[in-house]
Amino acid sequence: MRRREFLIRGVALAGAAAGTAHGAEKLADKLVGKPASKPAGPAAPALTADAPHSFEVWDWSNASKPKLAGNVTLDKRIDDFVYEDAEMAAENGAIAVVQSTESAMLGDIEIGFTLLAADRSNTETRDRPLYQVLGAFAHRGSWKTYPASDTFDSKNHITFPRPFKVVMKNAAGKTLHVFQLHDGKPINAPGLNQTRSEKEPLRPKFTVFMMLPWQNTRPRASKNRAKYYAGMTKDGMRPSIAKQHYSVLSCEPLVTGGYGRNSSNGLANIYGAPQWPRPLAVYWPKVQDPYLHNSEFNRNGGSAFGAAWVEGWDYEPGSFSCHNWYTGPGGPRFDRSAIPSVVAIWASDPNGRRLQENVAHRDWLDAWGMAYFNHGNHWVRDVKTMTLMTSRETMTTPWGTVGNYYGGGSIGPRSIRVNGDQRDGTTDANRDRNGDIWGNGWARDALHSYCNAGWMALLLNSPMHAIGSRFDVAVQMMMKGDPRGDVREEYMVRSQAWHWLHYVFAWKLASRHPLGIAREDVEDSFAMHCEAIYRQIYVPQLVEKKDDPYFNGLRNLGQPMTPSGDGSKWVAQGGHLGYYMGHVLQLMKQTGMWSAMMDRGGHVRDALLLQIRNMDHYAFGLHADTTATVADYLSFPAKGEFPKSMAHFQELYGSKDEDMYHDAKGNPVGDRDVSVHAVAQYIYIRRDYFPELPHPKLKAAAAALDRRLASVTARVAAAKDPEQKREADHTYRYPGLAPIRPPGRSQEVG
């Protein structure tokens, strides 16, 4: 990605001598390190003269006279990071890890750095090693147990470091990079606007819960990219899909002031976001994407006015970059799927360009990848080693979280407070002593835990994103708790899909390195989880044949049925949203985890096959035996007859005149809900990626779905111009929910 470097006043010369004590020729002798044993791929590279070596941390509280706060030298090579997975190890080889026995203090904030080095074959240019750096932060002072919640005081512990820059140098003292904002301002510069404004762009501050990433060159795409994700079908890549002003409905406390029913149409619209955030005053540039709903983005007083340019797509420390940080409030969002839409777009068309502003997909992807480190879950107890929990702790006895969007958790020495309790809007309790929303209001919850940096490690061979994935896996396990615990309330619900997604990434990116998670721990934890499913779901559903709506629903309809809020009807516990699991299962299959866990046999195998059985029963029945008009929740009267099958549901309660994309008079209708696409995606995944598991209704269901989707394709083709095509097309089928190409078909045009 293009990056401009800015020389900071009074810093380069003042700190030049700091890195000259060790010449480049002596670096290898000092960092003899611990190479990996028998690496499957290339060996870890010897560090060259251009390798990062030292980090000068400059306090910019006084912009006219920056002060050197500390200097960190990389002086400790530890074991090489090597993947346990044969495919990952063969591609990435051994990755050198160099840390420091030193750290720097910026007031009460401690800062440490880690260097990762991979062989040149892991880069696009193949002419130099891949160097990646992560800077970690921790609060010290009176927050004695950081990051634990027991000694956290939101009114006294400022979660934003004071203004600073970091100058990174090689061993000869040459400046390699300056960590700062894109326009040369210091990180957390005074005066950065922290809310939506008419005159100033929103530039979120960098928090102590984030990390500073850097790389010297682009890592190359994985040879197995198309195996893991073959890309969207041609039907899924129409430029008119999901371009309505309300195709995304997002909420971020800095923008909307917490939830309290406050959301903004168009916020974090990946197709319209400019490179950098813009003020609210009308900005919209010359229209290059004629499919976008430009009139709504420019209509003062409209729900989407200016929302498309509140966030930029590019990365700088602290930026949203169109990532969703405050995930709890409902609404369609472009990263709310197993694969984020930006990643799906690049993987489907690596050399393509976004229509608006002609952005190269790879530039877009690189910015998206860096922004993973702006999420507020990069908690470490030791900045020198970047550790919080051991591998075993993470997977079996993790810490917890408190202050969640949906409540739960408790304050203690093994819990971390997040700023999620803003369901009724942002209050003084969510602000620090300076009036800022502490931690930027970042909060992930189990129903929306879809973010995992592992996509960049898997598809792009980026080692630092494997490390980032560990932090995402950790927060998921922290929200879930004991893998042997209750599963009934999350079975066939979207939270189950996200839980399994993190298991898949933990398994595929496993490493016995201290910065990784051991595969043995992942498999043992997942096996415990499957045993819980066997005890709590399989036995009462299939062995005991328990006679209640929950298990009758699973047997008859493939959905556990629970009472509505007023008790007047039975509703599916997870509905279509549970079908986010479809892509998770595809990824599990393609990474090899499915086979590995199936090979365990016994109750683990039973739980896996039960998942397929129940998902099949509903999805195939919906499309083969009904008019497929059920939107998010399958429901029927509590006093009515309980359906014996989806065909019986259609007979008793189904629409007789409408179908999925037509009303009772035969007129075309749009998407009834975003989640209809998750069911559609599953049916094709089931057909193309699990052919060894036959089902008598699969062919009929797929044929019916083909016809229904073809009717939308036909009406889009018949529309005369981009505006009409957008109106005729899917409103909510964002790329992450588009049908996936069959295996081996990734190089076709669509």
Image (cartoon, rainbow, N blue to C red):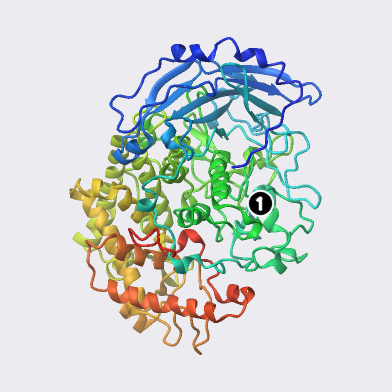
Could you tell me which residue is drawn at 35 percent across and 67 percent down? Answer: 683
At x 64%, y 74%, the residue is 723
Query: Is residue 573 or residue 305 the one in the foreground?
Result: 305
Is 576 left or right of 208, judged from the image as shown?
Answer: left
Q: Position of residue 533 (x, y in %)?
A: 29, 52
In-image side of 398 versus 190 (left or right): left
Badge 1 local density, few (<14 within 10 Å), some, or many (20+)?
some
Q: Residue at x 31, y 46 (%)?
A: 529
Picture quarter containing residue 70?
top right
Residue 73 shows up from this direction? yes
* Residue 132 percent coordinates (x, y): 51, 31
Q: Which residue type carries mark 1?
A: Gly
Q: Look at the picture and state if 240 lies above or below 126.
A: below
**Residue highlighted by disc 1:** 425
The C terminus: image quadrant: bottom left
Residue farthest to the top, as pictured: 21
Residue located farthest toward the front when viewing the structure as drawn? 127
Q: Nearer the viewer, residue 656 or 714?
A: 714
Q: Position of residue 8 (x, y in %)?
A: 73, 26
Q: Quadrant of the N terminus?
A: top right
- The answer to whether 384 is drawn above or below residue 431 in the figure is above
| Label 1: element kind | loop
Image position of 294 with respect to 104: above or below: below
Q: Nearer the viewer, residue 625 or 233?
A: 233
